Image (cartoon, rainbow, N blue to C red):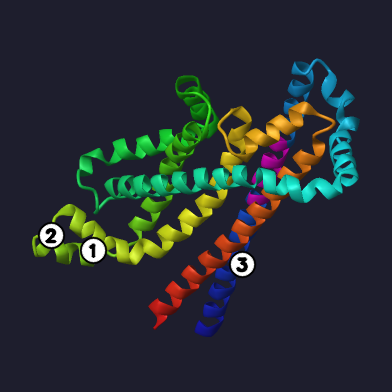
Amino acid sequence: MSEMTAAHAQGAATAQIRESYMAQTRRKRLYGTMMLVVFVALMASGFMTAEARNAGGFWGGLHQIGDFPAALLSEAGEKLSELPANLVTYFPALVETINIAAVSTLIGGVGGILLSMLATRGLALWPRMIPVWRRLMDVMRAVPEIVIALVLIFVLGGGPVPAMIAIAFHTVGALGKLFSEVNENASLKPVEGLASVGANWSQRMILGVMPSVAPNYLSYALLRFEINIRASAILGFVGAGGIGYELKNAMAWGIGRYDEAAAIFLLLFVTIVAFDQLGSHLRDRLTHGRKEELLA
């Protein structure tokens, strides 16, 4: 009798778990459907707004979307013999773009490390200021690079400096957020040990925190460097120097210089792919090397 009662209770518990699981699955499907409906509605309203603001030219000009690539490839094919010379001509502008991204990432990384440690519980120098540092990083992430660059170009004039400052400003906020999440998972025992022997805050951070979080820091910094290369190229369109500025000029002249635009596109494509692959390889080595070290 007791065995039958236990089996009945177990069956009832299994049925209850199954029913709870099915109810949860139905809720997820319902929420997913609602989100899909909202997304489709927003997309439809967005296209309608774009059409209205574009004076009805959006759908009317949609069939011409392939005209520019066709013209560019056609002229580039006709002047294929001039491609090597164009690549050499615009290579210095590409180097300038990479330099902008590298300096911005370096400055942003240093600033992000400092802000992340000031904004992490258990590591902060002034714990009451943690919300202030976090909101500061939110603001730095929220302002697009192009807005900062336009303001700086108005004040400082065109060139790579406004682009570098704009990207570095945004990078500090982005990396600071990522670094602070890494810091929260770091062990505080080395920090407490250093504090017990009288080490100051900077010594505790450099000697107690940095050795354990440096691989993750470097991994995120490499990822951000890839992003900053693209950002520095885009900022060239607003007069911030680099290869983006040359691309804007080549496209503005139109037919007759499309071969130069094709060369710039090729340089950008090869550079971005190369740095993406290199960054992915280095991040993979850092991540797996760190895991092997911890397992050992």
Q: Looking at the image, is mark 2 or mark 3 earlier in the sequence? A: 3
Asked whether 117 or 40 is in front, the reply is 117
Q: Position of residue 247 (x, y in %)?
A: 69, 36
Q: Residue at x 77, y 18 (%)?
A: 54
Looking at the image, is mark 3 or mark 1 nearer the viewer? 1
Q: Nearer the viewer, residue 252 or 115?
A: 252
Q: Mainly helix, strand or loop, the magenta region?
A: helix
What residue sits right under mark 2 in the picture?
199
| Residue to which mark 3 is pinned | 15
Image check: 170 left or right of 18?
Answer: left
- Residue under the point 61% across and 67% down: 15
Number of residues whose C-alpha sits closer than 10 Å to that of mark 3, classed few (under 14), some (14–19) or many (20 or more)? few
Residue 260 relative to residue 238: left or right = right
Left or right of residue 48, residue 211 in this image: left
Quarter of the figure with the C terminus = bottom left
Taking the image as shown, residue 264 lies to the left or right of residue 197, namely: right
Q: Is residue 275 above or below residue 227?
A: below
Disc 2 vs disc 3: Cβ atoms closer than 8 Å?
no
Q: Secondary structure at mark 1?
A: helix
Image x and y of residue 98, in percent: 55, 48
Of the residues under marks 3 and 1, which one precedes in the sequence? 3
- Residue range (magenta): 28-39
Task: Name the kind of residue labelled 1 in the image.
Answer: Leu
Give me the disc on residue 164: none
Percent x, y for residue 157? Answer: 50, 23
Query: Residue under circle 1?
Result: 207
Q: Is residue 33 magenta?
A: yes
Choose between 147 and 213: the one closer to the eye: 147
